[in-house]
Amino acid sequence: MDLITLLTLLPALYLCFLIWNLFDQKRDQECYILDYQCYKPSDDRKLGTEFCGKVIKRSQSLGLDEYKFLLKAIVSSGIGEQTYAPRNVFDGRESNPTLIDGIVEMEEFFNDSIEKLLSRTGVNPSEIDVLVVNISMLAVLPSLSSRIINKYKLRHDIKVYNLTGMGCSASLISLDIVKNIFKSQRNKLALLVTSESLSPNWYSGNERSMILANCLFRCGGCAILLTNKRTLKHKSMFILKCLVRTHHGARDEAYGCCIQKEDEQGRLGFHLGKTLPKAATRAFIDNLRVISPKILPTRELLRFFVVYLIKKITMLGKNNNYNTLKASSGVITTTKSPLNFKTGVDHFCIHTGGKAVIDGIGISLDLAEYDLEPARMTLHRFGNTSASSLWYVLGYMEAKKRLRKGERVFMISFGAGFKCNSCLWEVMRDLKGDQENVWADCIDNYPPKSLSNPFMEKYSWINDVEDESTAEIPDFLK
């Protein structure tokens, strides 16, 4: 009898051991954010209204029509007067950049943000196991990741990934790389560095679809320290719950809507096409279709399913033939999602691609102004800092003391290709906004009473000019 009991017990114990081992391994595959540090350039690099006017005026390829177009674009952009530009713009060399301009811009960011991040966390550079760097529009030799390794004397066996050409959505692509490494390797520390180099990418021509990039993009960056060490769980700020990447590069229309190219005069720039909104919408919908079941509670998915069935039955009950029904259902233009994302998400971290991007996501997800405030304020204060913009939005939430333990943050980003990437974070502890943050010196002033900028007030006279040669140019533009 004892032998039979033993033979029965051993397989059961072995099965329990396998289940526990599987569970234990899963715990070592988590992805935590220990800390992050956004970059704030020095005040001498701020783009005030009058200086922007001078930069536009000294561009010899622009005429009266382009001035009026730029005024309209800037006024409606949602960008304020305290954003930052590269140093070569202040030196008057934006049309003739050098390689060193791009390198210096990146090294200033590296030296500031990485230094502060390592100092605050107490992490020694030799402890870092993985380095992922994404700078889309600057490729140098040695690589930017090699420059970081040389600066901080990182280990010789560090795993390194240097990404270019990934656009504004590169942050979450880099994060996906780190997440996958953490699945197969235990007890690792990863440094993720995300930014964009503007110094060599100023467009000096007059094609409207390309000069828009000069209006929207600004300097910035972020360094993020991630880990899957269980021993550091209690120190972590966030844990990654899921991440979904959507790529529509196979569609020609989506592929060509955001692309770096030369204009007819051979001047290099970044083209933003008219098909961009359509491409972004399609990518966004496909991304939501995949991530929704991962982040929304079962009750919300069931509610949606029941409502969907009722609508289908109602439609089929109408006295219309099949063809009429098919035609009518094909022209529905409502962009609002039938799902209530607030049932599974507490905070929305939206890429600051522009005012239209923020407004569009707000309508699609039925978000209140409170939900959109972090993205709007980030666009106003820092502009579109490309792949790093998500982290400025997150920093705003932290500085406003909005993030509490257990709450969930949904990140959404778009990028050339065309891509839409999203992920969900859970807050690991109450974030009281008391650590060093790029918002610290101005958070009390946000949100301001008005987001309108003074460009129209100073430059509205250009709309009344019919002949540029006879226009009286204000002194501050001379």
Image (cartoon, grey):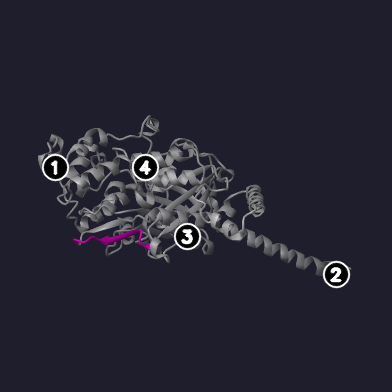
Locate the N terminus by quadrant: bottom right
Identify which amino acid the numbered label 3 is placed on: Thr
In depth, the one of 269 and 282 nearer the eye is 282
Task: Say which label, 2 or 3, has the lower sequence index.
Answer: 2
Among numbered discs 2 and 1, the one appearing first in the sequence? 2
Image position, residue 390 (x, y; %):
42, 48
Label at residue 4: 2
Q: Position of residue 294 (x, y in %)?
A: 58, 54
Location of residue 23 in the rendering, given as x and y in whole percent from the top left corner: 64, 59
- The range drawn in magenta is 255-265
Q: Which residue in the protein does label 4 denote?
A: 379
How far, Cα to Cα, is label 1 from label 3? Answer: 48 Å
User: Which badge, 4 or 1, comes first in the chain's sequence?
Assistant: 4
Query: Which numbered disc, 4 or 1, marks the residue closer to the eye?
Result: 1
**The one of 334 and 443 positioned closer to us in this rendering:** 334
Q: Which residue is mark 1?
A: 467
Q: Classify the position of the C terminus by image quarter.
A: top left
Side of 263 where 58 appears, left or right = left
Q: CA distance from mark 4 to mark 3?
A: 24 Å
